[in-house]
Image (tube, helix red, strand yellow):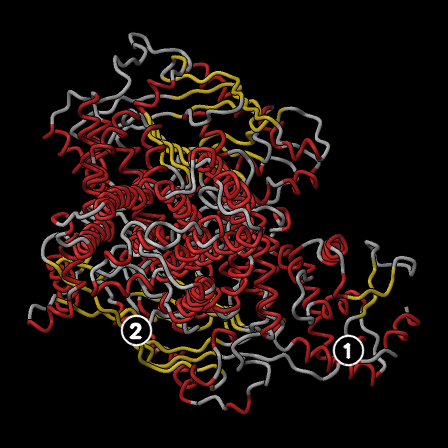
Amino acid sequence: MELQWAAIERLPTFRRLRLSLFDRKEDGEGEEGRRVVDVTKLEALERHVFVDKLIKKIEEDNCRLLSKFKERIEKVGLELPTVEVRYRNLSVEVEYEVVHGKPLPSLWNTLKTAFGGIANITGCKSVRNKIKILKNVNGIIKPSRMTLLLGPPGCGKTTLLQALTAKLDQSLKVEGEISYNGYKLNEFVPQKTSVYISQYDQHISEMTVRETLDFSARCQGIGGRADIMKEISRREKEAGIVPEPDIDTYMKATSVEGLKRTLQTDYILKILGLDICADTMVGDAMRRGISGGQKKRLTTGEMIIGPTKALFMDEISNGLDSSTTFQIVRCMQQLAHITKSTMLVSLLQPAPETYDLFDDIILMAEGEIVYHGPRDNVLEFFEHCGFRCPPRKGIADFLQEVVSERDQGQYWYHKQQPHSYVSIDMLVKNFHEFHVGQKLEGELSRPLQKSESHKNALSFSIYSLRKWELFKACMDREWLLMKRNLSLHVFKSVQLVVTALITMTVFIRSRMNIDMVDGDLYMGSLFYALIRLMCNGITELSLTIQRIEVFYKQRDFYFYPAWAYSVPAAILKIPSSLLDAFLWTALTYYVIGFSPEPERFFYHFFLLFLVHQASVSMFRLIASIVRNPSIASTFALFIILITFLFGGFVIRQPSLPSWLRWGFWLSPLAYAEIGVSLNEFLAPRWQKVSSSNITLGQQILESRGLYFNEYFYWIPLGALIGFWIIFNIGFTCALSYSKAPRRSRTIISQERLSNILKRKQDLIDFPRAETPKPAAEMEKISNNYLLMILPCEPITISFQNVQYFVDTPKILRKQGLPQKRLQLLHDITGAFRPGILTALMGVSGAGKTTLMDVLSGRKTGGIIEGEIRIGGYPKAQKTYARISGYCEQTDIHSPQITVEESVMYSAWLRLPAQIDKRTRSEFVAEVIEMIELGEIRDELVGIPGVSGISTEQRKRLTIAVELVSNPSVIFMDEPTSGLDARAAAIVMRVAKNIVNTNRTVVCTIHQPSIDVFEAFDELILMKRGGQIIYSGELGQNSSKLIEYFEGIPGVPKIKENYNPATWMLEVTGSSMEARLGLDFANLYRDSHLFQKNEELVARLGLPEQGSKELHFSTRFPQNAWKQFKACLWKQEMSYWRSPKYNLVRLIFIIVSSLIFGALLWQKGQKINDEQDFFNILGSIFIFIQFAGIANCSSVMPFVATERTIVYRERFAGMYSSWAYSSAQVRR
């Protein structure tokens, strides 16, 4: 090794920094496996093997790697750069509109906003108010420390993270000071110094996980790594230090910029657990891809793969189980502590072990910081305020609930005096007087000197790569995406070929002569070729809009400038345009019988190519300006309509009004029409001189208003090239200067605003004293839910030896798996009973959702074996669907109707027909009260992450929509996923309320908090492979579960106050089975508990005496007419509350009508020749055609949005396809 290293040391610096000793052996021992490699040329397999050898156990080996990295740097006397972020008196203010009545979007409200400027001038101002999202917050985010950001929804966590990273919307008013190492935000580039990891996953679906990370690493660059590596190498050479080969290889490989494939990608894939799906497409709603949890990890990996030292992470654990969250946060902790990074992480429901990884805590509520300081002092602060965390309560859960008005009282520990709500303002005041708050204020009063900042800590350049490197990176990605969408381009070309074949048979030359009459046919075929090639580029509209959000994200992080995105997009569409133009020309030119000269053939081909290029560029420009799919498609059609009208064929140029003839010279189609017409009709075969002493070709051109001198022959080519350049420059400018799409404007009703302000003032003036409610009163409240207006028939579900098989995927067969079928569930036996809340738990891949889908009848593929009984009778799916509800993990609802209307719509279609309207309304009111949706009943559901109600409220709405059908059985898939501790507690309280109505409720759930876990009565625990390892009661404080597993020899005892759910999953994992040499599934089958469950299933599998099997005389609860009325009502509401859609259609018709009226003013009264008649006829044809196409294209996004909702509602048996489609047609 010494000789090999000595050879490397003798090389020039540039070469030395790219060569390293690479060891292919797993143990790293011996010399035979070691060789000198160029780190920029490592193959994919070499990178994979190297990282696998470097990191076997993620938590331990990642810590070892980072420690050696730090040790090597410090050994030569270098220091790692650090970033300290300070914010002082930071306030963020937003403006919202106050309306009378329900705060719903409508055509009238939108018009008022659109013409708000005119209204202000005339004195008719809309009522607006302001609210502070952040209120004079102060703090320091220190390097080498992990800071956890906690707070209930709406407290301002995301706003704080965005403010600290300069990511706030420009419409927000920001006051206060933010600094990095003493530098203000305008003195450096914060977007390159820090990264904000959004809670929303925005990725290009056609790229794989590895490709997404590689592109991010390439664009973010290496920061100061190259300079540090160069200095390390120099000092080690002077000191005669030989570094460890693996660490040297890793550091050198991650210090080279501009690589297409980098070792850093393999490292990030490994520590985030994404190596198993590295080569899988990201996917989206229409393309199969990775799971939601994997997408969340990819969003994190895309940002941390860069060289930035300050990381601000927003709810990175959504959709992840707590073990995965713990692993990721542990790696982030190691990164912060060892490499001195600065980290602020927002989490919703951190488990106690994850919470303990953090050094500092920031607790927010109502836009204020209640606590900011060391984790060890947070409980001391709240005890100082009079609140104490119970022994078995997670501290993170306690912190989020103690600032809530509703939950605060339960933690008051001065039992001798009644609790009065301690407002957030009072808690903030107490913190400023607390010793941690005073220390923080003291640190903020001492300014940080800029001279203390490391030169590589902050970024002062906007982009990480040279212009050529940025261009190459974007060009490579665009080429990749073009290949991934090859099927689309092939389909377009095939479609063009079919159209060309039809066209050439319609205009076949054997029926066309060289004379004045057939000249119109030649002219028509030329014009059709132009419009066909122009319309063939409209697919660029949807492709651009699909990727525009990802572009804005990457542009705002300064991955690349707009030109680096637009230029490759323009260049790589040239081959497609050449192919389409050639196919059309080759198939039609000689068959139709155009002039046979070769130069005219190629001129015709080149013109069609330029038309296609100009068209594609124009549609890209439209997409970048409009960005809304519905509006963009209508606007694109309007532009095509204008282009056609002024193109010189539908209405000839001399027939245009004199004051509008300039429009002819602004239409790309006009130049193309002139070019192809001159090319054809100035050919030798059209040079016969007529009686009027002009050639036949000239006569035809003059009749169409297209005759120009011969020098004009080449002008169309230059004009079309000019349009292509202008459209692409416009596209680049639109991408450069347009802002990312904003969230919808905030609207609140006057009545609700008054209630909020009154309630807030009452809390200040008259703080309430609370005393615990007596048990009898609580029992009475709980029992009220048993007296609902519609009774529920209790139903039991029993299942015995259930097994589920699916066909083995082809990719696994190719990898050598011999089985033709995969078994996902093995001999599942159990029962669900009314009045008992049952949890289905297990690690990822255990089969929780699969089992619930099988039992609920949602699995339509695969093979199901075993016996499933409902109330003792064999399950009949059509009947069963009427008495059961299924709450999906993804909350799918129509966005444009209110919460109350969503529940009412479900009740309308799912309750029996004999229930009258009044009873139905009363039942809906009861359900809304039970699910605690009363305060938001009039709010629009909205689009997740964009508008409408919160995630937690959406979860409760999903439950209400199912409960209002009065089901006997309700299945809930991950009801607490993506919620904070308080929201999860609300959802579980709702679930308990439902169980109290004597219904059967089953929930799949990831690793929950103690409170959520112990809200369940019974548990079915599954292991990977679809086998049960526990099924039974939890007991008081999970005593029966703990007793069962602690009774197994070798299983570690649970620690005091430890979460039983966490302990349960830890001691039953595959690693524990391997260590103990046992199978928990076999132990369960041999247990007394299994025998008890077998007896229970056998008893429940027999019908009760006097009972009857469930049967319904009709397939649907309502008849076809009522189904149609309900569907029509919802669609009317949805469309009416989509003002953009309505305005676009209205404006299109009005503006189109005005243009047609202007172009054809009084033309119908002056038909003097055949051409005047053709002008009128052509205009009518074009208007009717485009009005229909515009309506069709504008409605498609709405149909697409409703499609997934229709699938859910049809599966629930709400209506027939005929009822829905009839209502859609009627609408």
In the image shown, does 1072 or 620 lie closer to the viewer? Answer: 620
Tell whether label 2 touches label 1 (CB within 8 Å).
no
Q: Residues within 10 Å of mark 2 (few under 14, many from 20)?
A: many
Q: Is residue 199 visible?
A: no
On screen, residue 1150 versus residue 269, left or right, reads left
Q: Is residue 293 above or below residue 741?
A: above
Q: Which mark is residue 92?
A: 2
Q: Quadrant of residue 765?
A: bottom left
Q: Amino acid at mark 2?
A: Val
Where residue 776 appears, as percent x and y from the top left, is 20, 40
Q: Secondary structure at mark 1?
A: helix
In the image shown, does 1158 or 420 lie closer to the viewer? Answer: 1158
Q: Amino acid at mark 1?
A: Phe
Where residue 1063 appears, as percent x and y from the top left, is 54, 45
At x 80%, y 75%, the residue is 15
Q: Residues within 10 Å of mark 1 (few under 14, many from 20)?
A: few
On screen, residue 1025 versus residue 1143, left or right, reads right
Q: Is residue 75 visible?
A: yes
Where residue 816 appears, as percent x and y from the top left, is 73, 32
Q: Which mark is residue 14?
A: 1
Considering the image in quadrants, where does the C terminus appear? top left
> Which of the two labelled residues, at mark 1 and mark 2, occupies the earlier sequence position?
1
Where residue 281 appears, as percent x and y from the top left, is 56, 47
Q: Secondary structure at mark 2?
A: strand
Q: Quadrant of residue 626?
A: bottom left
At x 47%, y 46%, the residue is 284
Q: Quadrant of residue 395?
A: bottom left
Considering the image in quadrants, where does the N terminus appear? bottom right
Q: Distance of mark 1 from mark 2, alpha carbons? A: 49 Å
